[in-house]
Image: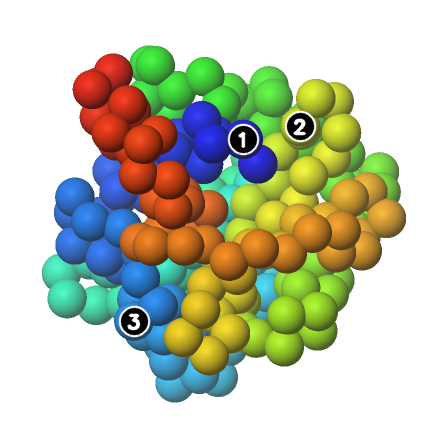
Amino acid sequence: MTRITALTLAAVLLACVPLAAAGEHMTPADAKATIKMLDDAKMTLAKSIETAETCCKGKAGFAGGHKHEGKVDVMVVSMVGEKWVECHIDAAGKCSKTSDWKPAADDKDHKPADMAKAVAAMGEAKITWAKAIEAAEGHSKGRAFGAHVEMEKDALDVEVYCLVGEKMMKCEMDKTGKVTKMEEMKGDAHAGHDHGDKKEDKKEKKDGGH
């Protein structure tokens, strides 16, 4: 995932009041809270995505931990036709809320047509979120707390974020469904937003970025 896309995805989830408090980024503690919620509900991230897709009759583009009014759930944003639908899977393992979701006007990375292409590419490659998450967890020896798919220079890029001990790891997969790269999400991070490069962070803030 490009840094710009990662920043955009972070903004997407921040706009929905993510697990970390508004204005902050996801930390290992937040990832642990998501995983605990899934364990308490006897669910997995893969099952949450499947439940959301069944509920909204769409195909998931990204998912991750989310906190609203003191309660933790998993937010899954799916493509349904030409629009986005936001589904929330609660601690009971059920879809507790659905609503239309629209990217911000300046969000160049989450256009319905582009996401539809990425989701279609996943289908053509016969990669399911269940398989992608299983591959990432097996490779990292951790637990998944978030996922995202996009087209990177016309190539399918599936990413799954896993908590491994106290570290958040990003696993990237190609159209074969195999993990091709794994790296630590340094510093505070949210669904792929890496704050390891302080110089770039300062530049982004100066330019009006998150």
Which residue is under mark 1? 2
Tell me whether the residue at label 1 lies in contact with that at label 2, contact meaning CB atoms closer than 8 angstroms. Answer: yes
- Looking at the image, can residue 31 be seen? yes
- In terms of sequence position, does the residue under pointer 3 or pointer 1 come before the other? 1
Residue 135 falls in which quadrant of the image? bottom right
Left or right: residue 141 versus residue 96 is right
> How dense is the environment of label 2, judged by Cα within 10 Å: few (below 14), some, or many (20 and up)?
few
* Circle 2: residue type: Glu
- The quadrant the N terminus occupies is top right
- In terms of sequence position, does the residue under pointer 1 or pointer 2 come before the other? 1
Q: Which residue lies furthest to the front in this view?
A: 199
Its colouring scheme is rainbow
Which residue is under mark 2? 152
* Circle 3: residue type: Ala
Marks 3 and 2, how far apart in space? 30 Å
- Looking at the image, can residue 54 be seen? no
Marks 1 and 2, how far apart in space? 8 Å
Instruction: Pinpoint residue 90: horizontal percent, then vertical percent.
Output: 35, 67
Which residue is under mark 3? 29
Query: Which label belongs to residue 85?
Result: none
For discs 1 and 2, the disc positioned in front in the rendered view: 1
Left or right: residue 101 versus residue 117 is left
> How dense is the environment of label 1, judged by Cα within 10 Å: few (below 14), some, or many (20 and up)?
few
Q: Tag 3's secondary structure?
A: helix
Left or right: residue 90 versus residue 124 is left
- The quadrant the C terminus occupies is top left
Instruction: Pinpoint residue 48: horizontal percent, then vertical percent.
Output: 51, 64
